Image (tube, rainbow, N blue to C red):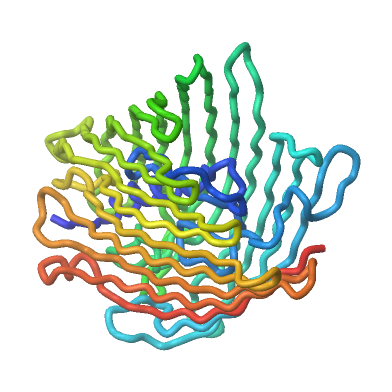
Amino acid sequence: MTLLSTPFVVGLGLFVVGGAALAQDRPAAETPSAPQPTASGMQEAKSETAIPVGLSEPLGPPTDPFNDTRTQGHVWGTMRYVPDVNLAYYHETNPTKVTSDGPSDQARVLYATLTVSDAQGGPRKLFVGTAQTRFSHVSLGSDPRRVLTYQDRFSVMDWKVPVRLGYSSDTISRASFLSRKVNTELGVTVKTAGVDANRAWGDTKLGLGWRAGDVRIGSAATSDGTVYRSTNSNTYHTLRARLTQPVSETTELIAFAQAQSYAYRSTGSGDPVNPTSDVRTVTVGVQHQLTEALALSADIGRARKTSGREDLVPAASHGVGSIKAGYTPSSGTEASAAYMAGVEELNDTGVSNLKTGTWSFGLGHRISSTLATTVSFDRTRVTTLELDGSVIDSKLYAALLWKPHPRLLAAVAFSRTRRQVAEGLQDFVRPFSNNRYLVNVTYYL
Protein backbone atom coordinates (compact mmCIF):
# COMPACT_ATOMS: atom_id res chain seq x y z
CA MET A 1 0.00 0.00 0.00
CA THR A 2 1.29 3.49 -0.79
CA LEU A 3 0.45 6.43 1.34
CA LEU A 4 0.79 8.90 -1.48
CA SER A 5 0.03 7.36 -4.85
CA THR A 6 -0.85 9.20 -8.05
CA PRO A 7 -4.56 9.16 -7.20
CA PHE A 8 -3.64 10.83 -3.94
CA VAL A 9 -1.81 13.57 -5.79
CA VAL A 10 -4.99 14.22 -7.77
CA GLY A 11 -7.24 14.29 -4.72
CA LEU A 12 -5.06 16.54 -2.60
CA GLY A 13 -4.19 18.69 -5.59
CA LEU A 14 -7.85 19.35 -6.29
CA PHE A 15 -8.44 20.23 -2.69
CA VAL A 16 -5.54 22.67 -2.45
CA VAL A 17 -6.04 24.25 -5.86
CA GLY A 18 -9.77 24.65 -5.37
CA GLY A 19 -9.29 26.46 -2.10
CA ALA A 20 -6.61 28.73 -3.54
CA ALA A 21 -8.66 29.62 -6.58
CA LEU A 22 -11.55 30.95 -4.49
CA ALA A 23 -9.87 33.97 -2.93
CA GLN A 24 -11.61 36.11 -0.36
CA ASP A 25 -13.30 39.30 -1.56
CA ARG A 26 -11.47 41.47 0.98
CA PRO A 27 -8.34 43.16 -0.48
CA ALA A 28 -5.26 41.90 1.30
CA ALA A 29 -4.07 45.45 2.01
CA GLU A 30 -6.95 46.10 4.39
CA THR A 31 -6.55 45.73 8.13
CA PRO A 32 -8.24 42.43 8.98
CA SER A 33 -11.11 42.16 11.40
CA ALA A 34 -11.18 39.62 14.18
CA PRO A 35 -9.98 36.20 13.00
CA GLN A 36 -12.94 34.02 12.14
CA PRO A 37 -13.28 30.25 12.55
CA THR A 38 -13.58 28.50 9.21
CA ALA A 39 -14.04 24.91 8.17
CA SER A 40 -10.73 23.20 8.77
CA GLY A 41 -9.07 22.23 5.53
CA MET A 42 -11.08 24.62 3.32
CA GLN A 43 -9.24 27.87 3.85
CA GLU A 44 -9.32 30.33 1.00
CA ALA A 45 -6.47 32.43 -0.30
CA LYS A 46 -6.19 35.97 1.06
CA SER A 47 -5.04 37.69 -2.13
CA GLU A 48 -5.04 37.48 -5.89
CA THR A 49 -1.91 37.31 -7.95
CA ALA A 50 -0.61 35.79 -11.16
CA ILE A 51 1.96 34.04 -8.99
CA PRO A 52 0.73 30.69 -7.61
CA VAL A 53 0.10 31.67 -4.00
CA GLY A 54 -1.10 28.63 -2.09
CA LEU A 55 0.24 26.23 -4.73
CA SER A 56 3.96 26.91 -4.45
CA GLU A 57 6.23 29.49 -2.93
CA PRO A 58 5.27 33.05 -3.88
CA LEU A 59 7.68 34.54 -6.39
CA GLY A 60 6.99 38.09 -5.33
CA PRO A 61 4.76 40.28 -3.20
CA PRO A 62 1.13 39.29 -3.89
CA THR A 63 -0.13 42.79 -3.06
CA ASP A 64 1.22 46.31 -2.73
CA PRO A 65 1.22 47.14 1.01
CA PHE A 66 1.61 50.87 0.32
CA ASN A 67 -1.39 51.42 -1.93
CA ASP A 68 -4.76 49.83 -2.56
CA THR A 69 -6.06 49.03 -6.06
CA ARG A 70 -9.07 51.19 -5.17
CA THR A 71 -6.84 54.31 -5.45
CA GLN A 72 -4.16 53.23 -7.95
CA GLY A 73 -4.30 53.04 -11.74
CA HIS A 74 -6.40 54.97 -14.23
CA VAL A 75 -10.11 55.86 -14.16
CA TRP A 76 -12.07 55.80 -17.42
CA GLY A 77 -15.78 56.32 -17.10
CA THR A 78 -17.10 54.34 -14.15
CA MET A 79 -14.22 51.80 -14.06
CA ARG A 80 -10.72 51.83 -12.57
CA TYR A 81 -7.88 50.00 -14.38
CA VAL A 82 -4.71 48.97 -12.52
CA PRO A 83 -2.17 47.27 -14.85
CA ASP A 84 1.36 46.27 -13.87
CA VAL A 85 4.34 44.40 -15.28
CA ASN A 86 6.83 42.43 -13.20
CA LEU A 87 10.25 40.84 -13.39
CA ALA A 88 11.44 38.36 -10.78
CA TYR A 89 14.83 36.69 -10.58
CA TYR A 90 15.67 34.04 -8.03
CA HIS A 91 18.26 31.42 -7.11
CA GLU A 92 17.39 28.02 -5.60
CA THR A 93 19.82 25.71 -3.84
CA ASN A 94 17.81 22.55 -4.60
CA PRO A 95 15.17 23.25 -7.31
CA THR A 96 14.62 19.55 -8.10
CA LYS A 97 13.72 18.89 -4.43
CA VAL A 98 15.68 15.63 -4.33
CA THR A 99 16.56 14.02 -1.02
CA SER A 100 20.19 15.09 -1.11
CA ASP A 101 21.30 18.55 -2.17
CA GLY A 102 20.79 18.73 -5.91
CA PRO A 103 22.27 21.17 -8.40
CA SER A 104 21.41 24.80 -7.71
CA ASP A 105 19.87 26.90 -10.47
CA GLN A 106 18.55 30.34 -11.35
CA ALA A 107 15.14 31.25 -12.74
CA ARG A 108 13.59 34.32 -14.36
CA VAL A 109 9.88 35.09 -14.08
CA LEU A 110 7.99 37.59 -16.23
CA TYR A 111 4.44 38.29 -15.14
CA ALA A 112 1.73 40.90 -15.57
CA THR A 113 -1.65 41.55 -13.96
CA LEU A 114 -4.65 43.76 -14.64
CA THR A 115 -7.31 44.65 -12.08
CA VAL A 116 -10.55 46.29 -13.28
CA SER A 117 -13.00 47.49 -10.64
CA ASP A 118 -15.71 50.05 -9.96
CA ALA A 119 -14.13 53.48 -9.66
CA GLN A 120 -16.42 54.35 -6.74
CA GLY A 121 -15.49 51.21 -4.79
CA GLY A 122 -18.40 49.04 -5.86
CA PRO A 123 -18.43 45.23 -5.73
CA ARG A 124 -17.51 44.48 -9.36
CA LYS A 125 -13.95 43.29 -9.92
CA LEU A 126 -12.16 41.57 -12.81
CA PHE A 127 -8.65 40.20 -12.31
CA VAL A 128 -6.42 38.89 -15.11
CA GLY A 129 -2.87 37.63 -14.65
CA THR A 130 -0.23 35.74 -16.60
CA ALA A 131 3.24 34.50 -15.65
CA GLN A 132 6.10 32.69 -17.40
CA THR A 133 9.01 31.05 -15.56
CA ARG A 134 12.29 29.98 -17.14
CA PHE A 135 15.06 28.12 -15.32
CA SER A 136 18.62 28.44 -16.63
CA HIS A 137 19.42 24.71 -16.62
CA VAL A 138 16.84 22.34 -15.14
CA SER A 139 13.47 21.90 -16.86
CA LEU A 140 11.23 23.17 -14.08
CA GLY A 141 8.37 25.61 -14.03
CA SER A 142 8.58 26.59 -17.70
CA ASP A 143 4.85 26.28 -18.33
CA PRO A 144 2.90 29.56 -18.23
CA ARG A 145 0.38 30.38 -15.53
CA ARG A 146 -2.95 32.04 -16.34
CA VAL A 147 -5.48 33.45 -13.87
CA LEU A 148 -8.91 34.96 -14.55
CA THR A 149 -11.49 35.81 -11.87
CA TYR A 150 -14.66 37.89 -11.76
CA GLN A 151 -16.67 38.87 -8.72
CA ASP A 152 -19.81 40.89 -8.12
CA ARG A 153 -22.48 41.33 -5.47
CA PHE A 154 -26.26 41.53 -5.78
CA SER A 155 -29.19 42.11 -3.46
CA VAL A 156 -32.19 39.80 -3.62
CA MET A 157 -34.95 40.86 -1.25
CA ASP A 158 -33.16 41.07 2.12
CA TRP A 159 -30.27 38.81 1.08
CA LYS A 160 -26.83 40.04 -0.01
CA VAL A 161 -25.46 37.68 -2.67
CA PRO A 162 -21.73 37.79 -3.57
CA VAL A 163 -20.83 35.83 -6.74
CA ARG A 164 -17.39 34.68 -7.89
CA LEU A 165 -16.16 32.89 -11.02
CA GLY A 166 -12.60 31.81 -11.72
CA TYR A 167 -10.27 30.03 -14.12
CA SER A 168 -6.57 29.25 -13.74
CA SER A 169 -3.88 27.10 -15.32
CA ASP A 170 -0.63 26.39 -13.58
CA THR A 171 2.36 24.14 -13.13
CA ILE A 172 2.41 23.20 -9.47
CA SER A 173 5.91 23.34 -8.04
CA ARG A 174 7.67 20.38 -6.50
CA ALA A 175 7.81 22.45 -3.33
CA SER A 176 4.04 22.34 -3.07
CA PHE A 177 2.23 20.39 -0.39
CA LEU A 178 0.45 18.03 -2.77
CA SER A 179 3.51 16.62 -4.55
CA ARG A 180 5.10 15.06 -1.51
CA LYS A 181 5.34 11.54 -2.94
CA VAL A 182 7.52 11.79 -6.05
CA ASN A 183 8.14 15.55 -6.03
CA THR A 184 6.55 15.91 -9.44
CA GLU A 185 5.34 18.94 -11.32
CA LEU A 186 1.72 18.83 -12.41
CA GLY A 187 0.02 20.79 -15.19
CA VAL A 188 -3.33 21.83 -13.74
CA THR A 189 -6.42 23.57 -15.12
CA VAL A 190 -8.98 24.82 -12.61
CA LYS A 191 -12.48 26.17 -13.16
CA THR A 192 -14.34 27.46 -10.11
CA ALA A 193 -17.64 29.08 -9.21
CA GLY A 194 -18.98 30.40 -5.93
CA VAL A 195 -22.17 31.99 -4.65
CA ASP A 196 -22.90 33.26 -1.14
CA ALA A 197 -26.08 34.56 0.46
CA ASN A 198 -25.99 36.58 3.67
CA ARG A 199 -28.85 37.92 5.77
CA ALA A 200 -29.29 39.46 9.20
CA TRP A 201 -32.21 39.29 11.62
CA GLY A 202 -31.33 41.92 14.19
CA ASP A 203 -27.94 40.89 15.59
CA THR A 204 -28.22 37.32 14.27
CA LYS A 205 -26.45 36.72 10.97
CA LEU A 206 -26.76 33.75 8.61
CA GLY A 207 -24.35 33.06 5.78
CA LEU A 208 -24.93 30.38 3.15
CA GLY A 209 -22.39 29.39 0.50
CA TRP A 210 -21.89 27.12 -2.48
CA ARG A 211 -18.59 26.32 -4.18
CA ALA A 212 -17.98 24.15 -7.20
CA GLY A 213 -14.93 23.33 -9.24
CA ASP A 214 -13.57 21.18 -12.00
CA VAL A 215 -9.85 20.49 -11.71
CA ARG A 216 -7.96 18.68 -14.43
CA ILE A 217 -4.35 17.49 -14.32
CA GLY A 218 -3.21 17.30 -17.92
CA SER A 219 0.48 16.36 -17.59
CA ALA A 220 3.20 15.59 -15.08
CA ALA A 221 6.99 15.66 -15.08
CA THR A 222 8.92 13.42 -12.70
CA SER A 223 12.15 14.40 -10.97
CA ASP A 224 14.21 12.48 -13.56
CA GLY A 225 12.77 14.64 -16.36
CA THR A 226 10.21 12.16 -17.72
CA VAL A 227 7.03 13.86 -18.99
CA TYR A 228 3.76 11.96 -19.42
CA ARG A 229 0.18 12.86 -20.18
CA SER A 230 -2.50 12.36 -17.55
CA THR A 231 -6.29 12.33 -17.52
CA ASN A 232 -6.65 12.68 -13.78
CA SER A 233 -9.45 15.05 -12.81
CA ASN A 234 -11.99 15.76 -10.14
CA THR A 235 -15.23 17.66 -9.72
CA TYR A 236 -16.13 18.93 -6.27
CA HIS A 237 -19.07 20.71 -4.67
CA THR A 238 -19.23 22.38 -1.27
CA LEU A 239 -22.23 23.63 0.67
CA ARG A 240 -21.69 25.63 3.84
CA ALA A 241 -23.71 27.50 6.45
CA ARG A 242 -22.48 29.89 9.15
CA LEU A 243 -24.64 31.28 11.97
CA THR A 244 -23.34 34.14 14.11
CA GLN A 245 -24.95 35.34 17.34
CA PRO A 246 -23.42 38.20 19.39
CA VAL A 247 -23.62 37.76 23.16
CA SER A 248 -21.94 41.09 24.00
CA GLU A 249 -20.34 44.05 22.24
CA THR A 250 -17.04 42.17 21.99
CA THR A 251 -18.03 38.48 21.82
CA GLU A 252 -20.03 36.38 19.39
CA LEU A 253 -20.81 32.68 19.08
CA ILE A 254 -20.51 30.89 15.76
CA ALA A 255 -21.94 27.60 14.48
CA PHE A 256 -20.65 26.21 11.19
CA ALA A 257 -21.63 23.25 9.01
CA GLN A 258 -20.17 22.12 5.69
CA ALA A 259 -20.78 19.29 3.23
CA GLN A 260 -18.21 18.47 0.53
CA SER A 261 -18.59 16.01 -2.33
CA TYR A 262 -15.84 14.76 -4.66
CA ALA A 263 -16.12 12.74 -7.89
CA TYR A 264 -12.83 11.37 -9.21
CA ARG A 265 -11.93 10.40 -12.76
CA SER A 266 -8.40 8.96 -12.77
CA THR A 267 -6.87 6.77 -15.48
CA GLY A 268 -3.39 5.66 -16.39
CA SER A 269 -2.16 5.74 -12.80
CA GLY A 270 -1.44 2.08 -12.17
CA ASP A 271 -4.04 1.37 -9.50
CA PRO A 272 -6.67 4.11 -9.73
CA VAL A 273 -9.43 4.39 -7.16
CA ASN A 274 -12.41 6.40 -8.38
CA PRO A 275 -15.12 6.38 -5.75
CA THR A 276 -17.18 9.36 -4.81
CA SER A 277 -16.19 10.86 -1.47
CA ASP A 278 -18.19 12.92 1.00
CA VAL A 279 -16.86 14.94 3.93
CA ARG A 280 -19.20 16.42 6.54
CA THR A 281 -17.87 18.99 9.00
CA VAL A 282 -19.58 20.63 11.99
CA THR A 283 -17.90 23.14 14.32
CA VAL A 284 -18.86 25.59 17.03
CA GLY A 285 -16.73 28.54 17.97
CA VAL A 286 -16.37 31.85 19.75
CA GLN A 287 -14.90 35.13 18.59
CA HIS A 288 -13.74 37.79 21.06
CA GLN A 289 -12.30 41.27 20.63
CA LEU A 290 -10.10 41.35 23.72
CA THR A 291 -8.83 44.88 23.09
CA GLU A 292 -9.07 47.28 20.18
CA ALA A 293 -5.85 45.77 18.83
CA LEU A 294 -6.15 42.09 19.86
CA ALA A 295 -8.75 39.65 18.55
CA LEU A 296 -9.06 35.97 19.49
CA SER A 297 -11.10 33.11 18.07
CA ALA A 298 -11.44 29.38 18.62
CA ASP A 299 -13.58 26.60 17.20
CA ILE A 300 -13.89 22.85 17.65
CA GLY A 301 -15.80 20.12 15.88
CA ARG A 302 -15.76 16.86 13.94
CA ALA A 303 -15.24 15.93 10.32
CA ARG A 304 -16.36 12.56 8.89
CA LYS A 305 -15.35 11.18 5.53
CA THR A 306 -17.32 8.44 3.74
CA SER A 307 -16.65 6.83 0.39
CA GLY A 308 -18.64 5.19 -2.37
CA ARG A 309 -16.14 2.29 -2.16
CA GLU A 310 -15.49 1.76 1.51
CA ASP A 311 -14.08 -1.68 0.72
CA LEU A 312 -11.16 0.24 -0.85
CA VAL A 313 -11.22 3.64 0.87
CA PRO A 314 -12.33 3.36 4.52
CA ALA A 315 -14.50 5.88 6.32
CA ALA A 316 -12.94 7.98 9.09
CA SER A 317 -13.76 10.64 11.66
CA HIS A 318 -11.38 13.30 12.92
CA GLY A 319 -11.50 16.11 15.42
CA VAL A 320 -11.00 19.51 13.81
CA GLY A 321 -10.67 23.02 15.14
CA SER A 322 -8.46 26.04 15.50
CA ILE A 323 -7.14 28.69 17.86
CA LYS A 324 -6.25 32.05 16.28
CA ALA A 325 -5.02 35.44 17.41
CA GLY A 326 -4.71 38.65 15.42
CA TYR A 327 -2.86 41.71 16.72
CA THR A 328 -2.91 45.12 15.01
CA PRO A 329 -1.30 47.64 17.38
CA SER A 330 -1.15 50.27 14.62
CA SER A 331 -2.29 50.77 11.06
CA GLY A 332 1.14 49.72 9.80
CA THR A 333 1.63 46.57 11.88
CA GLU A 334 -0.14 43.22 11.78
CA ALA A 335 0.74 40.04 13.67
CA SER A 336 -1.01 36.67 13.73
CA ALA A 337 -0.63 33.25 15.31
CA ALA A 338 -2.73 30.15 14.88
CA TYR A 339 -2.97 26.42 15.34
CA MET A 340 -5.33 24.58 12.97
CA ALA A 341 -6.29 20.90 13.15
CA GLY A 342 -7.96 19.71 9.98
CA VAL A 343 -8.38 16.98 7.39
CA GLU A 344 -7.59 16.78 3.70
CA GLU A 345 -9.36 14.67 1.13
CA LEU A 346 -7.52 11.61 -0.21
CA ASN A 347 -8.09 9.19 -3.09
CA ASP A 348 -5.88 6.20 -2.35
CA THR A 349 -6.44 2.51 -1.71
CA GLY A 350 -6.57 1.59 1.97
CA VAL A 351 -6.18 5.13 3.35
CA SER A 352 -9.16 7.22 4.48
CA ASN A 353 -7.82 10.78 4.45
CA LEU A 354 -5.05 12.90 5.90
CA LYS A 355 -5.10 14.51 9.32
CA THR A 356 -3.17 17.78 9.52
CA GLY A 357 -1.98 19.99 12.34
CA THR A 358 -0.55 23.38 11.36
CA TRP A 359 1.21 26.05 13.39
CA SER A 360 1.25 29.40 11.61
CA PHE A 361 2.89 32.71 12.55
CA GLY A 362 3.04 35.98 10.63
CA LEU A 363 4.27 39.54 11.10
CA GLY A 364 4.01 42.52 8.78
CA HIS A 365 5.35 45.97 9.64
CA ARG A 366 5.38 49.29 7.78
CA ILE A 367 8.82 50.68 8.63
CA SER A 368 8.22 53.95 6.81
CA SER A 369 6.04 55.38 4.06
CA THR A 370 8.24 53.61 1.46
CA LEU A 371 9.62 50.57 3.33
CA ALA A 372 7.84 47.49 4.72
CA THR A 373 8.77 44.01 5.87
CA THR A 374 6.94 40.72 6.30
CA VAL A 375 7.91 37.43 7.97
CA SER A 376 5.96 34.18 8.18
CA PHE A 377 6.52 30.62 9.38
CA ASP A 378 4.32 27.55 8.92
CA ARG A 379 4.79 24.00 10.15
CA THR A 380 2.35 21.23 9.18
CA ARG A 381 2.35 17.66 10.48
CA VAL A 382 0.48 15.10 8.34
CA THR A 383 -0.65 11.67 9.56
CA THR A 384 -3.19 8.98 8.66
CA LEU A 385 -5.22 6.59 10.77
CA GLU A 386 -4.01 3.56 8.81
CA LEU A 387 -0.23 4.12 8.55
CA ASP A 388 2.40 4.84 11.19
CA GLY A 389 4.69 7.83 10.96
CA SER A 390 4.27 11.40 9.79
CA VAL A 391 5.37 13.95 7.22
CA ILE A 392 6.33 17.42 8.46
CA ASP A 393 6.46 20.34 6.04
CA SER A 394 7.87 23.66 7.26
CA LYS A 395 8.47 26.96 5.52
CA LEU A 396 10.10 30.23 6.56
CA TYR A 397 9.50 33.32 4.39
CA ALA A 398 10.90 36.83 4.88
CA ALA A 399 10.71 39.82 2.55
CA LEU A 400 11.63 43.51 2.45
CA LEU A 401 9.56 45.76 0.17
CA TRP A 402 10.58 49.21 -1.02
CA LYS A 403 8.48 51.72 -2.97
CA PRO A 404 10.66 54.71 -3.91
CA HIS A 405 8.16 55.93 -6.54
CA PRO A 406 4.35 55.60 -6.84
CA ARG A 407 4.80 53.46 -9.96
CA LEU A 408 7.71 51.29 -8.76
CA LEU A 409 7.77 48.52 -6.13
CA ALA A 410 10.88 46.44 -5.41
CA ALA A 411 11.24 43.41 -3.11
CA VAL A 412 13.98 41.13 -1.87
CA ALA A 413 12.96 37.88 -0.19
CA PHE A 414 14.26 34.63 1.26
CA SER A 415 12.39 31.39 1.82
CA ARG A 416 13.39 28.02 3.20
CA THR A 417 11.27 24.92 2.72
CA ARG A 418 11.93 21.62 4.42
CA ARG A 419 10.19 18.24 4.44
CA GLN A 420 10.91 15.70 7.19
CA VAL A 421 9.66 12.14 6.74
CA ALA A 422 9.43 9.29 9.24
CA GLU A 423 11.78 6.43 8.40
CA GLY A 424 8.97 4.02 7.64
CA LEU A 425 7.47 6.35 5.01
CA GLN A 426 10.60 7.32 3.09
CA ASP A 427 9.89 4.78 0.34
CA PHE A 428 6.77 6.79 -0.47
CA VAL A 429 7.54 10.37 0.60
CA ARG A 430 10.89 11.99 -0.06
CA PRO A 431 12.44 14.44 2.41
CA PHE A 432 14.25 17.50 1.09
CA SER A 433 15.29 21.05 1.92
CA ASN A 434 15.58 24.05 -0.37
CA ASN A 435 16.50 27.73 -0.05
CA ARG A 436 15.29 30.43 -2.43
CA TYR A 437 16.70 33.96 -2.81
CA LEU A 438 14.54 36.42 -4.74
CA VAL A 439 14.60 39.88 -6.28
CA ASN A 440 11.30 41.17 -7.65
CA VAL A 441 10.45 44.47 -9.41
CA THR A 442 6.89 45.67 -10.16
CA TYR A 443 6.07 48.65 -12.39
CA TYR A 444 2.56 50.10 -12.43
CA LEU A 445 1.67 51.33 -15.92
Residue closest to the far top: 157
Count up the numbered dots.
0
In the image, taking residue 319 as reference, residue 375 lies left or right, namely: right
Horizontal and vertical percent for residue 304?
21, 34
Residue closest to the far right: 77
Residue drawn at point x = 27 percent, y = 64 percent: 181
Identify which residue, 61 or 111, lies in the foreground.
61
Instruction: Specify the quadrant that holds the C terminus.
Output: bottom right
Horizontal and vertical percent for residue 144?
60, 62
In the image, taking residue 197 as reference, residue 186 lies left or right, namely: left
Horizontal and vertical percent for residue 209?
47, 27
Q: In the displayed structure, would residue 23 be above or below residue 286?
A: below
Residue drawn at point x = 27 percent, y = 42 percent: 321
Residue 254 visible to an observer of this rendering: yes
In the image, taking residue 3 as reference, residue 211 lies left or right, namely: right
Q: In the displayed structure, would residue 76 be above or below residue 205?
A: below
Q: In the displayed structure, would residue 174 be above or below residue 261?
A: below
Residue drawn at point x = 65 percent, y = 73 percent: 371
Residue 241 visible to an observer of this rendering: no
Residue drawn at point x = 29 percent, y = 38 percent: 299
Identify which residue, 43 or 314, lies in the foreground.
43
Horizontal and vertical percent for residue 5?
25, 56
Identify which residue, 343 or 222, lies in the foreground.
343
Instruction: Specify the quadrant that holds the N terminus.
Output: bottom left
Instruction: Tell me which corner region of the image, top left, top right, bottom left or bottom right, holds residue 378.
Output: bottom left
